[in-house]
């Protein structure tokens, strides 16, 4: 029999979305809740045998009353079991919701740091997992352990980091996952999992977050539907990404090299958003790149006003004030010297240092011009 | 590069003004407000245009130099560079609204090769294309204005610093640093001092973090309380339902009990009536206790009578034994006859014994003969004779035996009579009988003791019989006749006692029933319990009634107790409910939404991150500015100072042969073998120092194709001698390709220039509109 398992995690309910506008923040919070409810409704309506939540269901250690009510309502509507492995954002400490038994009886939550498992005899499945009990979990809990019932479908539900052996968010080296010998590893923690999943091919996958929460989580987001079958001949697993989020965060670049008028820069930003086909359900960040005249004064907020037809627009000035800067380089006065002083940083490989240097040059020139 | 010709169509107050310039020193004379500064600005207009920005409350260049009447500033300028001769044409149109609040601009600028007439440097700023420097550098280096007063002390130091650092005394590195510091200070004070937005944000972050922790804790408590209240409420409702059910059952049981009591009352009454009927049966016995006492008394009397009777009987018997039996005449005759018979028997016995002995002897004799002499006899007694003899002997033996027996019997009888009469022999017997007869005559004597005793005995018997009669009569009421009076009496007593017990039992039973009746009679209302019956019937139609019906009293008590227990526990639960609800309301009212706090905290962190970036950038800018300043001081400044010192030495004919700038930009001068500070200088010397610095800057910054230097009233306070030297030097500089334009309102410069070769003097005519 093929089992259908809905694998999600990193939902981060009650994320404040403070980086967005005051009007949009509460709407996005509601949208995140709606996305979660849509996942649970899908599980209820499409005959899913089990729901796995690989940690960070909440964004904070605390949980709001509305969220508790939401969970109780949505979980209660499910006829299948829900297994939760608390992560670093919603660790199972003494005050957490996980140990307060507020959730319906079909919800099984790992509350111990040590590896444990929930047997589901009727499904022939054992789900292994553990819990973060504080923000940090420095060791791999799988060392030397094996599933107790090899003939059953063994699934590891874990919140951890497969990309770094020294991670403080439960290092899970792919080799350790292989050695453990689960039939599938349903993982959480990495929100943009494409690269990490490449290294996990055949043994498991990260589900990623079901909805982006900021521009660091741009692109299409989804939950994972796992179809798993095990018999004498072996285990067969297939996965399918299912999108539930209405809104997506998108990022594009607008090359402003050589532009000397802010108007042109703003129009370039709008043009970039339009050319990428962003629409009303997209929250868009346009990164202004390239070299511009040092005297150019770009106001990202003004630039964002030019981007129309999207849910939300944000412009980030990452331009380098080095365009046509020969006169500045040739200036033997203080301006030229400031430019020359900052030039190594302006040409640094570190974007943060470049950005700081660019800002510093603009501040310095404005100050010298008496315009600060 | 030098400016060959200027043609002003319309600029500021000037109209259609044309100036031909030489590649060396040009002195443009004119009275105040004749347009000298306007011409200087026109040069800048041609090369870079006019700025629309305002600063320090002054009107913008556009507003100042675009004539209001035409709204158009225009003109052209011909310049000669190493690469050729170019004509720059520029038109600037400014359109303002009626209130002059907003304006729109249209500008056209072209650079044409004077030889080929082709347009060159398209879409480039002419100044940048031709001079290779931006407007700012041009303005800061090429334009030398009047220093504006005596340069001394800190003012001069500042000006020097600014010139050294930026080529423009109006651009102050210090001010820039101050401005950056000000910005930095708005973000964070120095040296850990508490202040600035970042500091406020950090404090706010700490405050919100603490608030969030508290809010989270309270939120957790609220969630727990709500969950607990939910369960508690459900528990209370469940218990209330259970208590209600128990109460209903108890009530139903009570109603059914009332109905049962009604039945009990009826049954009690019936039972009492039955007992009363039974008790009425006992009325015929009268007082059973009295009867029992009477029987006991009679029994005692009878016993006493019997004792008396026995005593009397014993006395009478004793006396009776002392007296022979009463002998009647017949009996006396018979006794006497008996005495005679006894005597005869005695004699007869003796006779019989004698015959008996004879017969024995005869028989023994015959037998002996028969056996001792059988042969003798055999002959004699043969045949039948023998057997006859043997028979006769046997017969005689039998007879002997019979006679002995008869005699023994007679003797025995005789002896018996003797023994009866205790007599010794026949005579004694006769005497005894006679005595007996004589004594027996005493019984009939009323005065005899025997007669008295017999009378007492008779009376005792009569008394006893009377008592027995009375007792038996009494006993016969309670039990069946019994021949034995004692047993009869005992039976009667037992019967009375049994009757008493039965009666007492009945009374006891009656009292009990009456008690029961009293107990249940309270349920009987005015309607005699009809309502209770109706209620019971109604109750039985309900579940509670049916359940109550199947209950025993113990169960009913248990149910009622359970109801009370539940009610009692409900009080406690409701108290908990109230307390928890109060706590919940208190928490809800007094604790912020953790999400709102978290959002606020996140917002603070976002702002902090943004401002931190800004802070880092400002700090980076400050560091860069500082480092750049240090670099300039180390590299460029010594050269400029050295050059300026040389120029000043030339300007002052060697009086101020060298110029020094301290680290704090205080200026010093070598004069007459002494080092003097700025306060020592006169106003004119200060101006010379200033001009020396500007000239030094120009010579260093533009060593090859230097732009024209514009001196706008820069020498107003310089004496003639030194002015002469300055102008000579500027004129000589034309050999190195340096064009100088000196604007002045005096004629002194022109007069001096007349003595110099190759100086072009232009006179602006009065005010022009």
Image (cartoon, rainbow, N blue to C red):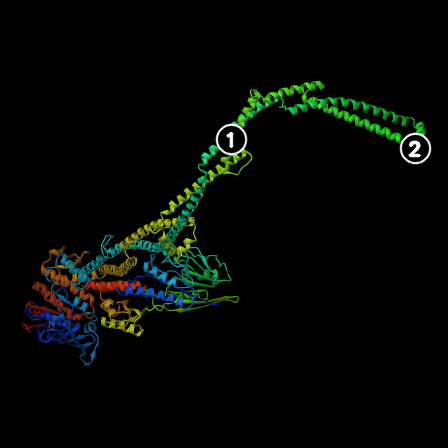
Above or below for B462 versus B194: above
Residue at 47% from the left image edge and 40% from the top image edge: B502
Residue receiving disc 1: B466
* Quadrant assignment, res B400: top right
x and y percentages locating residue A332 in the rendered image: 22, 65
Residue nearer the viewer, A258 or A65: A65
Q: Distance between the residues labelled 2 and 1?
A: 87 Å
> Relative to the observer, which residue lies in front, B688 or B468?
B468
* Letter of the chain that mark 1 sits on in the rendering: B
Q: Quadrant of the C terminus of chain A?
A: bottom left
Q: Do labels 2 and 1 share a chain?
A: yes
For disc 2, the neighbor class at 10 Å (few under 14, some 14 to 19, many from 20) is few
Q: Is mark 1 on a helix, strand or loop?
A: helix
> Badge 2 is on which residue?
B383
The label shown at residue A43 is none
How far across and down, in percent of the image, does residue B364 sit?
Answer: 86, 25
Secondary structure state at the residue bearing disc 2 = loop
Mark 1: give few (<14), some (14-19) or many (20+) Cα within 10 Å: some
């Amino acid at each position: 029999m093929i089992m259908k398992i809905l694998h999600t995690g990193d939902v981060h309910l009650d994320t404040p979305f403070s980086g967005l506008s005051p009007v949009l923040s509460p709407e996005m919070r509601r949208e995140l809740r709606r996305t979660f409810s849509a996942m649970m409704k899908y599980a209820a309506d499409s005959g899913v045998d089990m729901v796995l939540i690989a940690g960070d269901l909440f964004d904070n250690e605390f949980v709001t009353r509305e969220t508790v009510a939401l969970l109780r309502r949505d979980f209660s509507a499910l006829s299948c079991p829900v297994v939760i492995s608390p992560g670093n954002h919603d660790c199972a400490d003494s005050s957490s919701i996980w140990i307060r038994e507020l959730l319906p009886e079909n919800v099984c939550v790992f509350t111990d740091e040590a590896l444990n498992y929930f047997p589901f005899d009727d499904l022939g499945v054992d789900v292994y997992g553990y819990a973060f009990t504080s923000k940090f979990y420095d060791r791999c809990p799988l060392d030397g352990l094996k599933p107790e019932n090899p003939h059953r479908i063994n699934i590891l539900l874990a919140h951890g980091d497969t990309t770094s052996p020294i991670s403080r968010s439960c290092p899970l080296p792919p080799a350790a996952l292989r050695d453990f010998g689960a039939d599938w590893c349903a993982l959480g923690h990495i929100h943009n999992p494409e690269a990490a999943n490449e290294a996990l091919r055949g043994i498991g996958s990260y589900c990623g977050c079901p909805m982006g929460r900021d521009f660091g989580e741009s692109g299409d987001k989804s939950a994972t539907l796992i179809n798993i079958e095990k018999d004498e001949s072996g285990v067969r697993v297939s996965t399918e990404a299912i999108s539930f989020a209405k809104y997506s965060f998108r990022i594009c670049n607008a090359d402003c090299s050589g532009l000397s008028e802010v108007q042109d820069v703003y129009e370039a930003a709008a043009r970039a958003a339009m050319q990428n086909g962003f629409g009303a359900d997209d929250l868009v960040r346009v990164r202004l790149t390239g070299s511009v005249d040092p005297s150019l004064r770009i106001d990202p907020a003004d630039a964002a006003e030019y981007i129309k037809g999207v849910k939300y627009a944000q412009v980030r000035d990452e331009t380098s004030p080095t365009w046509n800067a020969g006169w500045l380089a040739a200036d033997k006065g203080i301006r030229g010297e400031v430019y020359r002083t900052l030039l190594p940083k302006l040409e640094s490989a570190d974007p943060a240092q470049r950005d700081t240097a660019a800002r510093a040059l603009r501040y310095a020139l404005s100050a010298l011009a008496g315009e600060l | 590069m030098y400016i060959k010709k200027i043609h002003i169509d319309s600029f500021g107050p000037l109209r259609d003004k044309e100036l031909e310039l030489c590649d060396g020193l040009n002195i443009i004379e004119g009275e105040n407000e004749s347009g000298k500064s306007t011409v200087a600005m026109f040069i800048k207009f041609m090369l870079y245009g006019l700025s629309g920005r305002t600063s320090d409350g002054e009107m913008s260049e556009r507003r100042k130099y675009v004539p209001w009447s035409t709204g158009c500033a225009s003109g052209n300028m011909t310049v000669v560079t190493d690469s050729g001769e170019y004509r720059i044409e520029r038109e600037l149109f400014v359109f303002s609204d009626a209130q002059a609040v907003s304006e729109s601009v249209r500008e056209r600028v072209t650079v044409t090769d004077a030889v080929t007439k082709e347009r060159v440097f398209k879409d480039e700023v002419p100044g940048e294309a031709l001079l290779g420097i931006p407007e700012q550098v041009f303005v800061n280096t090429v334009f030398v204005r009047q220093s504006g007063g005596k340069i001394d002390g800190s003012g001069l130091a500042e000006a020097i610093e600014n010139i050294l650092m930026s080529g423009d005394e109006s651009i102050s590195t210090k001010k820039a640093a101050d401005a950056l510091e000000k910005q930095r200070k708005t973000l964070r004070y120095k040296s850990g001092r508490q202040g600035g937005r970042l500091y406020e944000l950090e404090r706010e972050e700490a405050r919100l973090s603490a608030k969030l922790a508290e809010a989270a804790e309270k939120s957790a408590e609220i969630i727990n309380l709500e969950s607990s209240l939910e369960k508690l409420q459900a528990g209370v409702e469940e218990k209330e339902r259970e208590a209600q059910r128990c109460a209903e059952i108890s009530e139903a049981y009570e109603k059914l009990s009332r109905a049962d009591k009604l039945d009990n009352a009826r049954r009690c009454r019936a039972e009492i009536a039955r007992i009363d009927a039974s008790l009425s049966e006992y009325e015929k016995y009268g007082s059973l206790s009295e009867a029992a006492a009477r029987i006991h008394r009679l029994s005692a009397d009878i016993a006493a009578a019997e004792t008396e009777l026995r005593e009397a009987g014993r006395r009478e018997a004793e006396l009776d034994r002392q007296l022979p039996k009463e002998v009647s005449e017949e009996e006396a005759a018979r006794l006497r006859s008996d005495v005679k018979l006894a005597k005869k028997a005695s004699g007869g016995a003796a006779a019989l014994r004698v015959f008996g002995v004879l017969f024995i002897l005869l028989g023994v004799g015959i037998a002996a003969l028969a056996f001792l002499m059988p042969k003798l006899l055999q002959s004699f007694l043969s045949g039948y004779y023998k057997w006859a003899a043997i028979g006769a002997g046997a017969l005689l033996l039998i007879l002997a035996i019979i006679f002995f027996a008869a005699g023994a019997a007679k003797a025995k009888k005789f002896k018996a009579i003797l023994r009866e009469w205790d007599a010794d022999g026949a005579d004694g017997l006769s005497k005894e009988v006679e005595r007996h007869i004589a004594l027996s005559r005493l019984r009939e004597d009323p005065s005899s003791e025997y007669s008295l005793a017999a009378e007492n005995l008779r009376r005792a018997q009569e008394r006893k019989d009377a008592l027995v009669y009375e007792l038996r009569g009494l006993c016969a009421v309670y039990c069946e006749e019994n021949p034995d009076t004692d047993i009869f009496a005992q039976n009667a007593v037992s019967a009375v006692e049994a009757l008493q017990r039965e009666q007492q039992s009945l009374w006891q039973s009656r009292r009990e029933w009456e008690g029961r009746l009293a107990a249940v009679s309270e349920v009987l209302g005015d309607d005699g319990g009809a309502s209770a019956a109706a209620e019971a019937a109604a109750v039985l139609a309900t579940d509670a009634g049916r359940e109550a019906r199947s209950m025993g009293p113990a169960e009913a008590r248990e149910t009622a107790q359970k109801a009370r227990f539940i009610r009692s526990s409900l009080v406690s639960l409701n108290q908990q409910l109230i307390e928890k609800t109060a706590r919940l309301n208190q928490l809800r009212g007094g604790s912020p939404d953790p999400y709102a706090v978290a959002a606020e905290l996140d917002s603070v962190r976002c702002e902090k991150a943004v401002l931190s970036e800004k802070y880092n950038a400002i700090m980076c800018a400050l560091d860069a500015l500082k480092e750049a300043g240090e670099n300039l001081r180390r590299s460029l400044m010594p050269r400029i100072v050295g050059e300026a010192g040389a120029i000043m030495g030339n300007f002052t004919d060697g009086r101020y042969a060298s110029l020094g700038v301290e680290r704090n930009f205080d200026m010093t001068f070598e004069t007459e073998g002494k080092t003097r500070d700025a306060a020592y200088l006169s106003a004119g010397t200060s101006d010379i120092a200033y001009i020396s610095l500007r000239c030094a800057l120009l010579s260093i910054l533009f060593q090859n194709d230097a732009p024209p230097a514009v001196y706008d009233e820069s020498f107003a306070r310089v004496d003639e001698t030194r002015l002469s030297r300055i102008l000579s030097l500027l004129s000589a500089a034309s050999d190195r390709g340096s064009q100088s334009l000196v604007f002045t309102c005096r004629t002194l410069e022109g007069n001096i220039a007349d003595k110099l070769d190759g100086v072009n003097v232009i006179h602006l005519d009065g005010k022009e509109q």
